[in-house]
Amino acid sequence: MKKYYFTSESVTEGHPDKLCDYISDKILDECLKQDKNSRVAVETFASKNKITIAGQITSKAKVNIEEIVRETIKEIGYDNAETDIDYRNCDIDINITKQSDDIALGVDIGGAGDQGIMFGFATNETENYMPYALYIAHKLSRRLTEVRKKNILSYLRPDGKTEVTVEYEDETPKRIENVLISTQHLDNISMEQLRNDIKKYVIDDVIPKNMMDDETKIYINPTGRFVIGGPLGDTGLTGRKIIVDTYGGYARHGGGAFSGKDATKVDRSAAYMARHIAKNIVANGYADKCELQLSYAIGVEEPLSIYVNTFGTNKIDEEEIIKKIKNKFNLTPSGIIKYLDLQQPIFSKTTNYGHFGKDELPWEKIIEM
């Protein structure tokens, strides 16, 4: 019997890096609302009561970026420059240019907007075909935000992180070894109350009782204090939570970030397509676990390579799986965009709690292969 432990983390929407991802995706969505052919590559940087927006936008859209930034910070719940950031008076610096004509040469003819390698993954160990540790970590982060916004725990602030360690036996999740939650809070709450409340309203609400036991270790704000948070406690930057965004480290990552990029950037669109294919390989019963790699060259339409690894769980030959992929899917950038309908303003829905495993997103649809 093979036993091992695997850990994944998640963050709340108020984490400074996620704040930046969300702002970038909100700008992208507003461009796509007005012009579905918008080319967008926007980065956000958050520091002490200041937001910096930089990147390239080529679009017919007329976008009020400052308004989007302030409304997004307000939506997340940041309104105090003394502890995090204030949407009402933070400085906003904007430095936007147009897409390079050199890049446009390749994209305009249907080629990839950049070179790169992208991975997709799926496993049947959870209902949404995601790795179990990340599945639970995301649910904890989402619940942490929910109890704050619903005033169940009104003393919480937006910044927070979760981490879950799962014990596996023979590749199957058996129990949870560790749970870690760090959450920003107001100064007037005791650690005893906070820890009791987080256990009751977050952990107990999310984690199945049969997955925890007397040996499960729970850590809640282990430093004992987390009042200063958000961009005041730590700078934020678009694209720094790529493992949280994908598979929690359980599968490989090509290195490209998603947020702020339109679908001509294969960093994003091909990663979504790779997840769609990997999920359907598992959902159709061809394997219990699947990792798929696609590679692209800038300006070239077809992927340079397709790689499939089912970790010995395949029910048919992997060569046959690759044939099914090639026969079923158009893996050119334009083919992916059309198949997944990626010119729609859906990207701010992806930003928080993972880009995968959400049934409402088109790449999560189960089809017959």
Image (cartoon, rainbow, N blue to C red):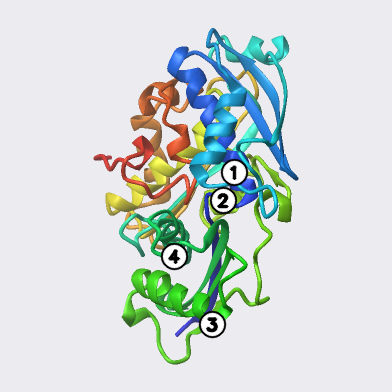
User: Where does residue 161 sit, x and y in percent of width and height?
Assistant: 57, 62
What amino acid type should be assigned to the residue bearing mark 3? Glu
| Neighbourhood count class around disc 3 (C-alpha, 10 Å): few under 14, some 14–19, many 20 upward | few
C-alpha separation, residue under disc 3 versus residue under disc 1: 29 Å
Dot 4: what SS?
loop
Q: Nearer the viewer, mark 2 or mark 3?
A: 3
Residue at mark 2 = 14
> Of the residues shown, which amino acid type is indicated by label 2?
Gly
Name which residue lies at 65% across and 22% down.
298
Q: Residue at x 68, y 76 (%)?
A: 223
Residue 281 on image: x %, y %? 35, 48
Query: Label 3 belongs to which residue?
Result: 192
Give the Cα separation between the discs numbered 1 and 2.
Answer: 6 Å
Front tag of 4 and 1:
4
Q: Is residue 133 above or below residue 248?
A: below
- Of residue 327 and residue 8, the one placed in the foreground of this image is 8
Q: Decide which of tag 2 and tag 3 comes sooner along the chain.
A: 2
Mark 1 = which residue?
19
For disc 4, the marked residue is: 153
Q: Residue 48 got which mark?
A: none
Number of numbered discs on residues: 4
Of marks 1 and 2, which one's residue comes earlier in the chain? 2
Q: Which type of secondary structure does the marked residue at label 3 adopt?
A: helix
Secondary structure beneath label 1: helix
| Residue drawn at 36 percent across, 68 percent down | 206
Residue farthest left in this picture: 368
Q: Earlier in the sequence, mark 4 or mark 2?
A: 2
- 10 Å crowding of disc 4: few (<14), some (14-19), many (20+): some
**Does the CB distance between marks 1 and 2 fall below 8 Å?**
yes
Amino acid of disc 1? Leu
Query: Distance between the Cα atoms at labels 3 and 4?
Result: 14 Å
